[in-house]
Amino acid sequence: MASQQANREELDEKARQGETVVPGGTGGKSLEAQEHLAEGRSRGGQTRKQQLGSEGYHEMGSKGGQTRKEQMGREGYQEMGRKGGLSTMDKSGGERAEEEGIDIDESKFKKH
């Protein structure tokens, strides 16, 4: 039990330094704040899914992806997918690509 408390304190300290330590907790300035943000975002998505139904929610996501693809162009959208595919729980796709020497051409991301 004591090690669990020490781990929470360590995560809280990282959060205070600006690191995201809870998936979905982006922007929280403490471990507790990040936990609350993640919970609220998850609950918001669940509520919307209930409102639209499973098929409607899926359709909404598909339309969003199509819109983004149109904004970025086919090549940029594929490059973004490559970068996202490299991400892990503890590293962003950009960090991992840099570490492993994988070239991600972010100039393709911009369509305007």
Image (tube, grey):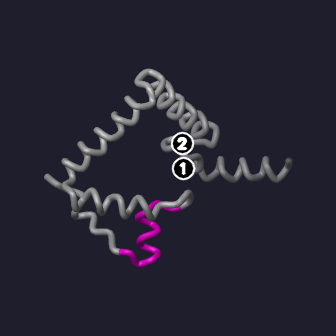
The span picked out in magenta is 91-102
The one nearer the camera, 9 or 56, is 56
Foreground residue, 103 or 77? 77
Disc 2 marks which amino acid?
A: Gly
Q: Position of residue 82 (x, y in %)?
A: 36, 64
Q: Main secondary structure of the magenta part?
A: helix
Residue sitting at x 49%, y 42%: 27
Residue 110 included in the magenta stretch of the image: no
Task: From the top left corner, tell me how far across and down residue 30 is, in percent.
Answer: 60, 42
Q: Are marks 1 and 2 in contact (CB under 8 Å)?
A: yes
Residue projecting furthest to the front = 55
Question: Residue 25's image quarter?
Answer: top right
- Quadrant of the rendered structure where residue 59 is? top left
- Residue at numbered disc 1: 20
**How far is disc 1 from disc 2 in space, using C-alphas?**
6 Å
Q: Which residue is mark 2?
A: 25
Q: Earlier in the sequence, mark 1 or mark 2?
A: 1
Neighbor class of circle 2 (other Cα within 10 Å; few <14, some 14-19, many 20+) is: many
Q: Measured from the top left, where is residue 22 in percent x and y?
A: 59, 46
Label 2's element? Answer: loop
Whether the magenta-drawn stretch holds residue 99 is answered as: yes
Residue at image coords 22%, 62%: 75
Compared across the picture, whether 75 is left or right of 23 comes to: left
Indicate whether 56 appears above or below 89: above
Name the disc covering residue 10, or none: none
Q: Work out which residue is located at the far top of the displayed protein and give it.
A: 51
- Give the answer, above or below, for where 98 lies relative to 31: below
